[in-house]
């Protein structure tokens, strides 16, 4: 008999729904990934580097050329200088980056504040480190931070707060004023931050992304995480990075070097080349995804779903209370997949205590126009 270290963990909702979509032939708007390829020059660069022999271990902290490109992108995007050598670490995916950051600083008995709905990888990582998550719900309709509840959740054991902006699954953004308020709240406490900013370049309507990297005070205690998968349409490459002050990076690297040692070499070469040659890719990304959001939302306007256009990410939440208020969101997602041919993600699975009566599912719009049109056609007749 095995006594599980993670008794509450099963198969993730992303695996479950993507599998169901494949079995039923439904359009898969559940797990977040594009149904189109990354830029051709990026794909070609991988082949070139594999053929030219870049197939052995990369440096543990990441290829220097890629770390330099990351630092250059950060300088362009947020106007701050980070050291590519001591502050940037390339990891096999943002998930691994988050895991390593948590293992690096969380000890047995520590508490970590997370905000519900909460991305699913945080809590198991905290539990494996011997810590415990304290769940604070975000605002019911706008998914904003509730500072009274954060303050109430703080204890002498609080060792970390995990932020996620732009937020999966709601698309909500954290503002500069909120970061300032957070800084004030934890100023005299020994608390680290993980800021999960994997959707940093998917922010719409001309609103800039507010990065913890650009918050001088908070950055001193932060691990800021991003993913090339989202930014370059290559989620299957599982390549990401962490930016943290040198002392924190050093601790993170101690874990990273024994979790994986390094990221995949030819992918790092290809990303470094592409970032150097196409800095405009990142600048064009908001408009690229905003056009998809707007097309999808325009097509859904005649449907019986209600929604507010998301501020960021490539997910759109839709409320189905006018359609099947009798179904909870897991049942609704299964019903939509099986009976209407569109796979979605229920939102309640990201809560410790799902809000009573919430009727929301998440749709991924990182899809070709043709897929969005087909999906909208099906959604409009539900
Ligand atoms: N954080 C959030 C909020 C995500 O949505 C995702 C993934 N899709 C990740 C982290 C993980 O990114 P990666 O695939 O690079 O591990
Ligand atoms: N982050 C992706 C999503 O939210 C899923 C990644 C995964 O499958 N673990 O859909």
Image (cartoon, helix red, strand yellow):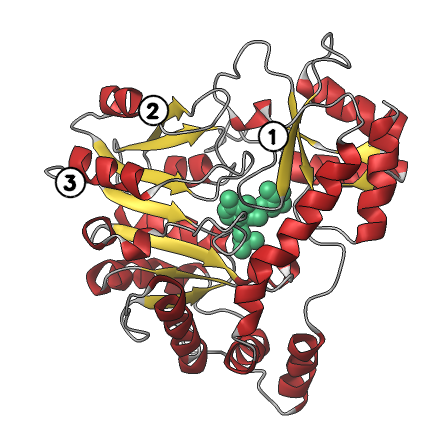
Is residue 45 toward the left or the right of residue 376 in the image? left
**Label 1: element kind:** loop
- Image spot of residue 14 (x, y percent): 66, 39
Q: CA distance from mark 2 to mark 1?
A: 20 Å
The residue identified by callout 3 is: 190
Which residue is rendered at x = 68% and y = 20% of the image?
329
Quadrant of residue 278 in the image?
Answer: bottom right
Name the mark nearer the viewer: 2 or 1.
1
Q: Residue furthest top?
A: 326
Decide if residue 368 is in sight here: yes
Is residue 171 toward the left or the right of residue 97 in the image? right
Quadrant of residue 306 in the image?
Answer: top right
The residue identified by callout 2 is: 146
Category of crowding for the residue at label 1, using alpha-carbon neighbours closer than 10 angstroms: few (below 14), some (14–19), many (at least 20): few
Name the mark nearer the viewer: 1 or 3.
1
- Image spot of residue 146 (x, y percent): 34, 24
First in residue order: circle 2 vs circle 3: 2
Identify which residue, 108 or 139, lies in the foreground: 139
Q: Indicate the quadrant containing the C terminus: top left, top right, bottom left or bottom right.
A: top right
**Label 3: element kind:** loop
- Image spot of residue 130 (x, y percent): 33, 36
First in residue order: circle 2 vs circle 1: 2
Category of crowding for the residue at label 3, using alpha-carbon neighbours closer than 10 angstroms: few (below 14), some (14–19), many (at least 20): few
Is residue 320 toward the left or the right of residue 275 in the image? right
Q: CA distance from mark 1 to mark 3?
A: 38 Å
When the figure is inspected, residue 186 is found, relative to residue 284, above or below; the finding is above
Which residue is rendered at x = 64% and y = 53% of the image?
289
């Amino acid at each position: 008999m095995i006594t599980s270290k993670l008794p509450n963990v099963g198969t993730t909702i992303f695996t479950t729904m993507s599998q169901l979509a494949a079995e039923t032939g439904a359009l898969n708007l559940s797990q977040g990934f594009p149904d189109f390829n990354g830029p051709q020059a990026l794909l070609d660069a991988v082949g070139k580097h594999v053929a030219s022999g870049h197939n052995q271990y990369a440096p543990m902290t990441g290829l220097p050329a890629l770390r330099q490109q990351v630092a250059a992108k950060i300088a362009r995007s947020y106007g701050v200088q980070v050291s590519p050598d001591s502050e940037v670490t390339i990891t096999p995916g943002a998930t691994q980056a988050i895991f390593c950051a948590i293992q690096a600083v969380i000890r047995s008995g520590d508490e970590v504040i997370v905000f519900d709905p909460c991305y699913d990888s945080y809590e198991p990582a905290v539990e494996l480190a011997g810590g415990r998550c304290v769940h604070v719900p975000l605002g019911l309709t706008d998914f904003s931070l509730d500072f009274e509840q954060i303050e109430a959740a703080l204890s002498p054991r609080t060792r970390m707060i995990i932020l996620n902006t732009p937020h999966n699954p709601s698309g909500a953004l954290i503002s500069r004023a909120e970061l300032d308020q957070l800084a004030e709240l934890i100023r005299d406490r020994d608390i680290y931050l993980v800021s999960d900013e994997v959707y940093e370049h998917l922010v719409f309507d001309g609103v800039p992304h507010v990065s913890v990297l650009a918050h001088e005070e908070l950055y001193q205690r932060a691990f800021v995480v991003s993913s090339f998968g989202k930014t370059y349409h290559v989620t299957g490459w599982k390549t990401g990075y962490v930016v943290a002050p040198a002392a924190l990076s050093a601790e993170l690297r101690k874990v990273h070097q024994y979790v994986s040692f390094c990221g995949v070499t030819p992918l790092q070469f290809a990303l470094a080349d592409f970032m150097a040659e196409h800095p405009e890719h990142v600048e064009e990304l908001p408009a690229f995804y905003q056009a998809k959001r707007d097309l999808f939302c325009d097509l859904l306007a005649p449907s019986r779903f209600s929604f507010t256009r998301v501020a960021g990410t490539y997910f759109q939440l839709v409320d189905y209370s006018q359609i099947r208020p009798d179904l909870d969101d897991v049942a609704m997602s299964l019903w939509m997949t099986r009976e209407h041919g569109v796979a979605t993600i229920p939102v309640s699975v990201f809560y410790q205590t799902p809000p009573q009566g919430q009727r929301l599912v998440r749709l991924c719009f990182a899809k070709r126009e043709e897929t969005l049109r087909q999906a909208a056609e099906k959604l409009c007749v539900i």
